[in-house]
Amino acid sequence: MNVLFYQHQYPAFGGIETVTTLLARQFVKDGHRVKIVSFRHRDGTGLLEQLPDGATWQELPEERFDSAANMTALSAIFNDFVPDVVIFQDSYTNIHTLLFEVIAGYRARHKVKVFAVEHNEPLGTWRLRKADRNLWTVFCRFVKICIWPYYKRRRLKIEAGRRVEIAKFVDAYVVLADAYAKTVRELVGPVLAGRVLVIPNPAASVSAKAKGEKENVVLFVGNLSVTKGVDRMLKAWRSIERLVPGWRFRIVGDGDMRTRLELLSLGLYHVDFLGAQAEPSNYYKTASIFLSASDYEGWPMTLCEAMSHGCVPVAFDSFGALREIVENGRSGLIVSAFNIRAFSNALRKLMIDQSMLKQMSGAAVSGMASFGAQLVAQRWYELFSCSKVRAAR
């Protein structure tokens, strides 16, 4: 079987790109051919080196999605590779028009199944954090409250219309968690709701040797953007740093919030900003605790990779898939969003109770076994071969 992944960027440092790599490796291992097509890339991630023989990557000539050059190039890729399955990985970007136009012509000659994947929490971006208080932000918030009902109706119409457009064309619209399926089914309506299916992201398998000896390290890995909530982590850390001597907080990643976050960390003596790293697994190996404080997430790959290495998560209950990944009190601690005091208390509790930390570490590793690449790939194969999958032609 020939499987084509279609997405905005690859390779790059991000969850979607990591998922594509893990699935591509498993598909090739199971005897299939894989091609990854993207509009742009970011060097230095090491993902291309992880692709096995039987998986290739090709970048389209222009970043502008609807260009004639891209149309010609993508059509040539379809004619040469002859995919049996297309997995559209970026359902919330505007690259679907080009793909669907090419597939429409391709379907006249070949059978192909098309699946769209939504990698974020549906409507997650609606949960905007409260801005710092000043006269301007208070005024803006008052205006937003006044116009919210009208804005909400308009946004819902746009969000629903986009998903209906995609769901009509594809064989299945895949989301990452049961909590997300309910939202998308409501958006696309009863006629298309049957096409909304759930397949979680795979977690990378980690050998016992790769886990390494744990140290008194709290870790965050990810983009330093405002939605990741690293400022919340620093506030929690500030309240307990002096109470837990011998522990360090390491922040792996880069982004537009880095300078501001470094300013917030002034006066803290055990915080390290390490920048973006091509091999974050080196930090998962030694860290004991992993922090998640995002405004919203889809299915965070850094959280899963951390747990695969035995890092125990402390996470805000801020996205629907969290409780499908973390079993509260067993494989990690889930805290009401966005209670900084409760977050810092949960973090300190783990740091001072080594017995609990060790027990949860083992549970975190075993919990990730159910999301292994082989098991997730099997769910994809069942979808590939399902005769009940419908598509509008």
Image: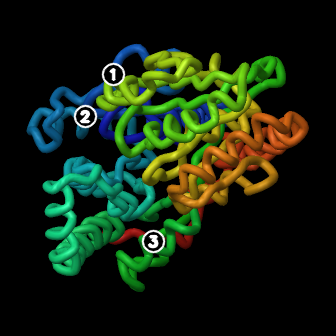
User: Regarding mark 1 in the picture, which secondary structure is present there?
Assistant: loop
User: Regarding mark 2 in the picture, which secondary structure is present there?
Assistant: helix
Going 58% across and 67% down the picture, which residue do you hit? Answer: 178
- Residue 119 appears anywhere in the view: no
Left or right? Give the position of 197 relative to 359.
Answer: left
Q: How far across and down, in percent of the image, does residue 26 sit? A: 63, 35
User: Regarding mark 3 in the picture, which secondary structure is present there?
Assistant: loop
Q: Earlier in the sequence, mark 1 or mark 3?
A: 1
In the image, what residue type sits under mark 1?
Answer: Arg
Q: Quadrant of residue 163?
A: bottom left
Q: Earlier in the sequence, mark 3 or mark 2?
A: 2
Going 54% across and 62% down the picture, which residue do you hit? Answer: 320
Q: Earlier in the sequence, mark 2 or mark 1?
A: 1
Q: Pick whichever, 339 or 267, lies toward us.
A: 267
Q: Quadrant of residue 91?
A: bottom left
Q: How far across and down, in percent of the image, does residue 123 sit? A: 37, 64
Q: Nearer the viewer, mark 1 or mark 3?
A: 1
Which residue is the extreme one toward the bottom? 190
